[in-house]
Image (cartoon, rainbow, N blue to C red):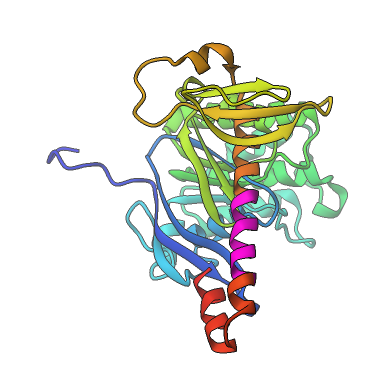
Amino acid sequence: MVDGSAPVPALEAGGLSKRYRRGVLALQAVDLTVAAGSITGLVGPNAAGKSTLMKTFVGFERPTAGEVRVHGVDPWRDRAGALDRLGYVPQSPSLYRSLTVREHLDLAAHVRPGFDHVSAGEHLSDIDIPLHSRPSSLSGGQQAQVMLAIALGTGADVLLLDEPLASLDPLARTEFLALLRSAIRERRATVLLTSHIVTDIEQICDRLIVLGIGRILFDDALATAPAVHRALAGYQTVPDGLVEVGRFPDDSGEPIILLRTPEGSGTASSGEQVARPATLDEIVKGYLVAGRRLHRAAATCCARWCGSSGSSTASSWRAWL
């Protein structure tokens, strides 16, 4: 910044909570900052709140508490201002059945001034998606590619990609990631990508967020995360100098313990020498197990409280959770 002030983050969430009808709490006091030009992977189980978080940035969902901003713009108060900076690929491709692929590109060009119709069409032709085809004749993976081409064609500063790789075969996934890398290099786009495929996150992202039951369980740079985590195989005691995060079975059914170096520890402990470095996949699984454990503990506490209290108090406790 010319004036010396801190740059405005591409995406911000402060105290963000979202409660749906019947008391379903999708997000719980989420604080998040995504720097411009970064590529962040968002991982979590189904119903973790990943899609809800994406939709609040687009302005499709209104926060119950807290706020979100896109380059400083509140998408609920100024959706047009936020959407000018966004390219969004939803979890389920949203294409019009009556329009051809070319007509979808025409529509995008009409709605978004500056839309790069030529490059979007060339990309789709390169991967053998006919511009005269309609969505009903395309596979789920091909529809996702059309959505990505439209999102990239907008030239948006921020790309929100909600599990775009789920329906792609290995080759299509590789092509998708290659196109994404190219777009990021060319214009320093900011990307928030949700996926269940940790290897894809590892290939393209520089930061990892693990979301579980509406809460952020882990948030760190991919470059530093392995340095502070260790894995221990089998039924072993946690070594001194390390903190247990979670336990889960490996592919053969044998237990793995994810361990973390205590905060502020500057020197390696004897425990770190015993345990091996953890993989990114193990880090994700360890924190997901930890999130499940926290959720069960909260549910048990709620049940005990509600069982010994009046109905009004019980309702207040549920609302707090």
x and y, in percent, of residue 228 in the image: 47, 24
x and y, in percent, of residue 121 in the image: 66, 39
Per the image, is 294 magenta?
A: yes
* Horizontal side of residue 108 vs 30, given as left or right: right
298, above or below 39, in the image:
below
Q: Main secondary structure of the magenta part?
A: helix
Specify the quadrant of the image occupied by residue 61.
Answer: bottom right
Per the image, is 302 magenta?
A: yes
Q: Is residue 156 visible?
A: yes
Q: Residue at x 71, y 39 (%)?
A: 165
In this rendering, the count of numbered labels is 0
19, above or below 193, in the image:
below
* Horizontal side of residue 74 vs 299, given as left or right: left
Residue in the foreground of this view, choosing between 296 and 215: 296
Q: Residue at x 37, y 39 (%)?
A: 36
Residue in the foreground of this view, choosing between 61 and 32: 32
Looking at the image, which residue sits at the far right? 137
Quadrant into which the N terminus falls: top left
Q: Residue at x 72, y 54 (%)?
A: 92
x and y, in percent, of residue 261 in the image: 46, 26
x and y, in percent, of residue 217 in the image: 53, 45
Extent of the magenta region: 292-303
* Horizontal side of residue 205 vs 32, given as left or right: right
Q: Is residue 110 visible?
A: no
Residue in the foreground of this view, choosing between 32 and 95: 32
Looking at the image, which residue sits at the far left? 3
Residue in the foreground of this view, choosing between 305 and 132: 305
12, above or below 227, in the image:
below
Q: Residue at x 75, y 44 (%)?
A: 131
